[in-house]
Amino acid sequence: MPIFDPTEYVSDSTSTKLLSETTAVFIAESMERNPGQRADYFNIAFRVITGPHSGEYFYDNFSLSDKALWRLGKLAMAMGQDGSLDLEDDDDVGDYFLDREFAGTTEVQEDPQYGDKAKLNIKTLRVLSEDEKKEVKTVYKDKGTAHDEGWRGTPRAAKVDKDDVPF
């Protein structure tokens, strides 16, 4: 296997520009298993449920290769999950990850690759604080629980107009 030098894979720092950063609560709304070159991966759609980007969606891929399972583990821990599961059982995986909230920091970046749109990314993730749990209960009271019919929207890529980003 060749030597990995991460500096060879970092894009030019002038190509992206951080437009804003905020803390929010997210929920995993859908996921699908896809074949990868070396291992399957889960493509998970997350919805922002609090903060200025509430209602926006973004996607992330989580590889099931042994070397990348730390990312899925970090997500599970942020969701308050600490039990084991069978990653080959899609029903078990869905029960474990879907409709689970977690908190994190979002960042909105301007990237020429996305044209006139800015891209919403999750930067950090963690377990909900007590105040965030209360805020989520308020959201659910207004819109129903995450498990209610009609709660889920149609996941779409979270792209934010640069004019909508507070500076």
Image (spheres, rainbow, N blue to C red):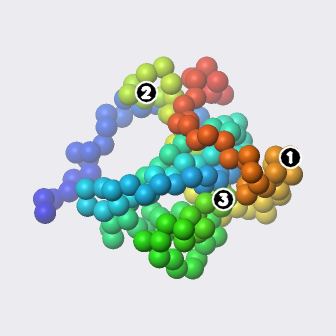
**Looking at numbered disc 2 in the image, what kind of residue is underneath it?**
Tyr
**Looking at numbered disc 3 in the image, what kind of residue is underneath it?**
Asp
In the figure, 152 relative to 19: above or below?
below
Mark 1 packing: few (<14 Cα in 10 Å), some, or many (20+)? few
Residue 154 screen position, x and y as percent: 61, 40
**Disc 2/disc 3 C-alpha distance (Å):** 29 Å
* Disc on the earlier residue, 1 or 2: 2
Residue 114's tag is 2
Q: Quadrant of residue 40?
A: bottom left
In the figure, 57 relative to 87: above or below?
above
User: Which residue, given by chain and number where applicable, does mark 3 sit on?
Assistant: 99
Whether label 2 touches label 3, CB < 8 Å: no
Which residue shows up at 58% across the image and 23% down it?
161
Residue 88 screen position, x and y as percent: 42, 71
Which residue shows up at 45% across the image and 62% down it?
71
Residue 93 screen position, x and y as percent: 53, 68
User: Which residue, given by chain and number where applicable, does mark 1 sit on?
Assistant: 142
* Disc on the earlier residue, 2 or 3: 3
Which residue shows up at 58% across the image and 77% down it?
82
